[in-house]
Image (cartoon, rainbow, N blue to C red):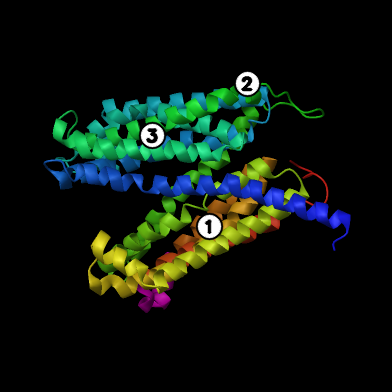
């Protein structure tokens, strides 16, 4: 039999692991479901009278505008980090609301002034025929910052209260609403063309946000009733801005990663084929990646109380990341991906070997990404967000160097250079964060949390 102290320790460890899984698993499932939302939107656009035109206008208008609006959504990390006491959370809300207002003004300028033509036609390449429809998309996206703010604020409350399962239910309701809109709106004539896509997108997020507010509302008294712990001070707006700016930089750099990979693949021996292979592979791989990326760091941010919690978080985080990587590799090796590619996505059979190869290279990404997420979570907990931004900058630099340079040395790698570059960037990111961020000690509280 174990000594009494060992029994207590084992029981505490099981309780910590249970808490971590109850937090992370719903968060990961929510992200996986969110990854499917654009398939629903595309299905709705495919039912319009001119689907190719609608899909093209929506893709250009939504992706570019969402890039401008993403800082408001990224502010969820700041709201979560500073939801520890009433005054800190109020300061974080004021900063997030101010950011949402600025983004709304910017989108309004793009949608209703000649600057929109410069951005969407001269920079991002919209044709003269497509431009009016793109502008209709952008003008409706003026509501995007408000929806992002509502979701970010309410979900920060739910995560602080460790009720991530409520976020999963909100996403289920969102998906149901989007499916109904995609099925019935095209025949009603209420909204047409690319505007149908952005309507389904924003209303769907609004449904999710409203559900999260409803679920979070009974918890507001507890969250906003917390006072600052003894010996510490509440965060100010300046503290929140210092935290937020590097995180926004990290998010923007992340949005450039895939375009950088595509730019490199466009310069390979068979660019069209390699771009197609990589895009199809990424659409499948992202379902696995979504479970880990971003979410694991937020799990660490909320639950990292001391060294013992870190050991549990590290054990669960590495285990889940390895499990996702193994599941992805097994999914490819067992032939399941072939059936999806042929019967659901409709990929030509000649591309199957190349897609399988790329996916096998990609299967290591969830594991390395999980290691990055664990260190990122410590940095977020300690407010050392400049390190997070610097790590992502190094990450992107390596991606660019590898994806442009490696094909010159090994041209036969073809589309495989994409996941190799992505993995190389993540690896350097992890090495950098590991060298700069110490693990919490055991026992005792995290000295800088």
| Of the pair 176 and 438, the residue shown nearer to us | 176
Q: Circle 1 sits in a helix, a strand or a loop, which is it? A: helix
Q: Circle 2 sits in a helix, a strand or a loop, which is it? A: helix
Q: Circle 3 sits in a helix, a strand or a loop, which is it? A: helix
Q: Quadrant of the N terminus?
A: bottom right
Q: Disc 2 or disc 1, which is closer to the eye?
A: 2
Q: In screen coordinates, is 25 left or right of 130?
A: right
Residue shown at 24% from the left, 74% from the top: 350
**Disc ID at residue 205:** 3
What is the spatial separation of the Cα atoms under label 3 and label 1, in whole angstroms?
30 Å
Query: Which stretch is magenta?
Result: 402-414
| Of the pair 193 and 154, the residue shown nearer to us | 154
Q: In screen coordinates, is 150 left or right of 338?
A: right
Q: In screen coordinates, is 274 left or right of 15?
A: left
Instruction: Name the residue carrying label 1.
Output: 395
Q: Check the image and report above or below for 379 versus 219.
A: below
| Of the pair 235 and 367, the residue shown nearer to us | 367
Instruction: Name the residue carrying label 2.
Output: 221
Q: Check the image and report above or below for 70 versus 33.
A: above
Question: How many residues crowd mark 2 within 10 Å: few (<14), some (14–19), many (20+)?
Answer: few
What is the spatial separation of the Cα atoms under label 3 and label 2, in whole angstroms?
25 Å
Toward the left, the furthest residue is 49
| Chain-order first, disc 3 or disc 1 | 3
| Chain-order first, disc 3 or disc 2 | 3
Q: Check the image and report above or below for 87 versus 449.
A: above
| Chain-order first, disc 2 or disc 1 | 2
Residue shown at 66% from the left, 23% from the top: 86
Q: In screen coordinates, is 321 left or right of 273?
A: right
């Amino acid at each position: 039999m174990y000594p009494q102290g060992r029994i207590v320790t084992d029981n505490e460890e099981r309780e910590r692991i249970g808490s971590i899984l109850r937090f992370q698993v719903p968060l990961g499932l929510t992200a996986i479901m969110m990854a499917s939302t654009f398939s629903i939107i595309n299905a709705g656009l495919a039912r319009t009278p001119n689907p190719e035109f609608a899909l093209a206008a929506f893709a250009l208008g939504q992706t570019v505008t969402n890039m401008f609006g993403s800082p408001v959504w990224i502010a969820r990390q700041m709201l979560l980090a500073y939801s520890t006491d009433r005054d800190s959370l109020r300061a974080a809300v004021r900063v997030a609301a101010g950011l949402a207002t600025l983004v709304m003004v910017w989108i309004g300028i793009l949608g209703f002034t000649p600057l929109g033509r410069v951005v969407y036609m001269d920079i991002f390449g919209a044709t003269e025929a497509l431009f009016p429809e793109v502008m209709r998309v952008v003008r409706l996206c003026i509501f995007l910052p408000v929806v992002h703010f509502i979701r970010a604020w309410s979900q920060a409350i739910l995560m602080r209260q460790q009720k991530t399962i409520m976020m999963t239910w909100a996403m289920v309701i969102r998906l149901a609403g989007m499916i109904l809109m995609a099925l019935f709106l095209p025949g009603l004539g209420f909204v047409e063309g690319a505007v149908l896509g952005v309507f389904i997108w924003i209303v769907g997020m609004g449904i999710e946000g409203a559900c999260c507010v409803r679920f979070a509302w009974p918890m507001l008294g507890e969250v906003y009733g917390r006072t600052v712990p003894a010996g510490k001070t509440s965060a100010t707006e300046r503290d929140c801005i210092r935290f937020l700016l590097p995180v926004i930089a990290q998010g923007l750099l992340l949005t450039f990663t895939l375009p950088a990979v595509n730019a490199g693949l466009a310069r390979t021996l068979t660019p069209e084929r390699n771009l197609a292979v990589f895009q199809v592979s990424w659409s499948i791989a992202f379902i696995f990646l979504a479970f880990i990326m971003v979410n694991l760091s937020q799990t660490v941010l909320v639950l990292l109380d001391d060294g013992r919690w870190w050991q549990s978080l590290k054990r669960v985080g590495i285990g889940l990341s390895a499990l996702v990587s193994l599941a992805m590799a097994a999914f490819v090796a067992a032939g399941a991906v072939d059936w999806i590619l042929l019967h659901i996505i409709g990929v030509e059979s000649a591309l199957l070997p190349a897609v399988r190869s790329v996916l096998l290279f990609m299967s290591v990404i969830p594991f390395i990404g999980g290691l990055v997420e664990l260190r990122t979570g410590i940095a977020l907990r300690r407010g050392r967000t400049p390190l997070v931004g610097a790590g992502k900058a190094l990450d992107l630099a390596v991606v660019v160097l590898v994806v442009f340079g490696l094909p010159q040395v090994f041209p036969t790698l073809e589309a495989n250079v994409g996941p190799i570059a992505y993995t190389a960037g993540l690896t350097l990111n992890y090495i950098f964060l590991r060298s700069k961020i110490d693990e919490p000690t055991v026992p005792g509280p995290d000295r800088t949390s």
